[in-house]
Amino acid sequence: MNRIKKLFSEKNKNIVSIYFTAGFPLPNDTHIILEALQKHGADLVEVGMPYSDPLADGPVIQQSDAVALHNGITIKKLLEQLHQIKNRITIPVILMGYLNPVLQYGIEKFCNDAHDAGVDGIILPDLPLHEYETEYKKFFEKNNLDFTFLITPETSEKRIRKIDAISKGFIYAVSSSSITGINKDINKQQKYFQKLEEMNLKNPVLVGFGIKDNKTFSEACKHTAGAIIGTAYIKVIEKSVNIDEDTKIFLNSIL
């Protein structure tokens, strides 16, 4: 069973997913961060594939992408890093990034290599639904990779239903139509989260954008399966001299 499916079959509330950018702050930190997150309670990890123009991301993640690219991180290097430690990682690993570098790598090759590296799922926010369904879905499914789509408060119910029908793993509910790292009042989005809960979707929902502490995490989890934290964690590891210890402190503060 795909580890994402296994996770949601065993746990359906208060799931904490952590995002970090591969190759940040140092080029070989990927395995250190992954093992620290696994050790200290993360349920799911999203590894960012650095890109020069991450349109959905705020300044903190943009800067981490710039540093990672300067550090020489490519999709190929990242997959090599993941392959080296795949036997030590038991929690689900998702790759998150943008379509252009994946197209340059070759989507079929990317899916094959991601599977070989122990990856469980993929998020490419700028891959259109139609193109995924008609051209690329077969490559993801062949390699047992769950593909996750993003929705926002403005996404129509019809489109949410369509995404739910063709998605596997979970649905990524962006808390508001903005970039990552925003300081929005998550509590004001409860009607949106409640609507998603009442739709009885087949896929669980995780909330992202603006989750940074126990308060925002708890509010995001009231009507959903859990939440995704990125910017707040990247701020922690950016200046860390002990990633393992600082990861432990951070996750304890969330949970």
Image (spheres, rainbow, N blue to C red):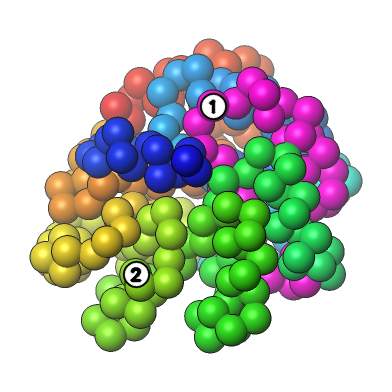
What residue is pinned by disc 2?
164
- What crowding class fits label 1: few (fewer than 14 Cα within 10 Å), some (14-19), or many (20 or more)? few
Give 54 or 76, whichever is nearer the viewer.
76
Between the C-alphas of marks 1 and 2, the distance is 26 Å
Q: Assign the C terminus to one quadrant of the image.
A: top left
Q: Does the magenta-highlighted stretch encompass residue 72?
A: no
Q: Residue at x 38, y 56 (%)?
A: 170
Closer to the camera in the image, 8 or 53: 8
What residue type is disc 2 on? Asp
Q: Judge from the rendering whether residue 77 lies leftward or rightward of residue 61; answer left or right.
A: right
Task: Give coordinates of residue 65: x percent, y percent.
Answer: 70, 52
Q: Nearer the viewer, residue 77 or 130?
A: 130
Q: Amino acid at mark 1?
A: Thr
SS state under label 1: loop
* Label 2 CA crowd tier, 10 Å (few <14, some 14–19, many 20+): many
The magenta segment is: 74-103
Asked if residue 45 shows in the view, the reply is no
Q: Is residue 88 visible?
A: yes
- Which residue is located at x 88 percent, y 46 percent? 72
Q: Please name the predominant secondary structure of the magenta segment in the image.
A: helix
**Residue identified by numbered label 1:** 90
